[in-house]
């Protein structure tokens, strides 16, 4: 395992999570996600600076850890493969365990889990192409 991290690529990957999230939880799934999560889609968000700041820090940590996992010179196929693997087998399934105990809906798990699979695939694409 190498800690030779391309920091600009990691920042780009973390930013990509925001772009994806804006599309995913905006026009694509906002209404369904809000309904399943029990959130008023027209309600005023509380503390958006704190929420988005925390989300970016966490996305940056995840992208950094993923870069370490991929190593110093990942290929695009390796990045995509590991993105699917980590996004589905680690993140989405972990959400699934919590959602089962919390009795959250399958639809909510598919929306949230699908986002994280694509998030890590995007990380893999960015880190795999960044040489």
Image (spheres, rainbow, N blue to C red):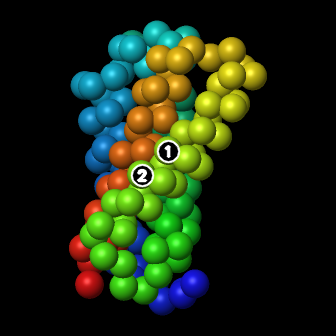
Query: As drawn, which residue projects farthest toward the right?
Result: 101
Quarter containing the C terminus: bottom left
Can residue 44 be seen by looking at this rendering?
no
Q: Nearer the viewer, residue 6 or 71?
A: 71
Residue name at image x 64 percent, y 40 percent: 94
Residue name at image x 42 percent, y 51 percent: 84
Q: Nearer the viewer, residue 35 or 78?
A: 78
How many C-alpha atoms fall within 10 Å of the one at disc 1: few (<14), some, or many (≥20)? many
Query: Do tag 2 and tag 1 residues touch (Cβ < 8 Å)?
Result: yes
The residue pinned by badge 1 equals: 88
Q: Is residue 122 left or right of residue 2?
A: left
Cα separation, mark 2 vs mark 1, equals: 6 Å
On the image, the x and y values in percent for residue 59 come to 49, 56
**Rendered view: 121 above or below 76:** above
**Rendered view: 12 above or below 33:** below
Residue name at image x 46 percent, y 74 percent: 70
Q: Is residue 125 left or right of residue 3?
A: left
How many C-alpha atoms fall within 10 Å of the one at disc 2: few (<14), some, or many (≥20)? many
The residue pinned by badge 2 equals: 84
Q: Is residue 85 left or right of residue 31?
A: right
On the image, the x and y values in percent for residue 10 come to 40, 71
Can residue 81 be seen by looking at this rendering?
yes
């Amino acid at each position: 395992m190498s800690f030779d991290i391309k920091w600009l690529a990691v920042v780009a990957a973390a930013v990509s999570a925001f772009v994806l999230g804006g599309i995913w939880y905006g026009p694509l799934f906002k209404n369904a996600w809000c309904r399943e999560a029990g959130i008023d889609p027209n309600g005023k968000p509380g503390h958006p600076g704190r929420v988005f700041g925390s989300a970016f820090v966490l996305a940056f940590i995840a992208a950094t850890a993923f870069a370490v996992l991929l190593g110093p010179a990942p290929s695009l196929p390796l990045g995509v493969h590991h993105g699917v693997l980590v996004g589905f087998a680690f993140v989405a399934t972990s959400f699934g365990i919590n959602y089962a105990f919390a009795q959250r809906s399958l639809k909510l798990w598919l929306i949230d889990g699908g986002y994280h699979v694509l998030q890590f695939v995007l990380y893999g694409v960015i880190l795999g192409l960044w040489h």
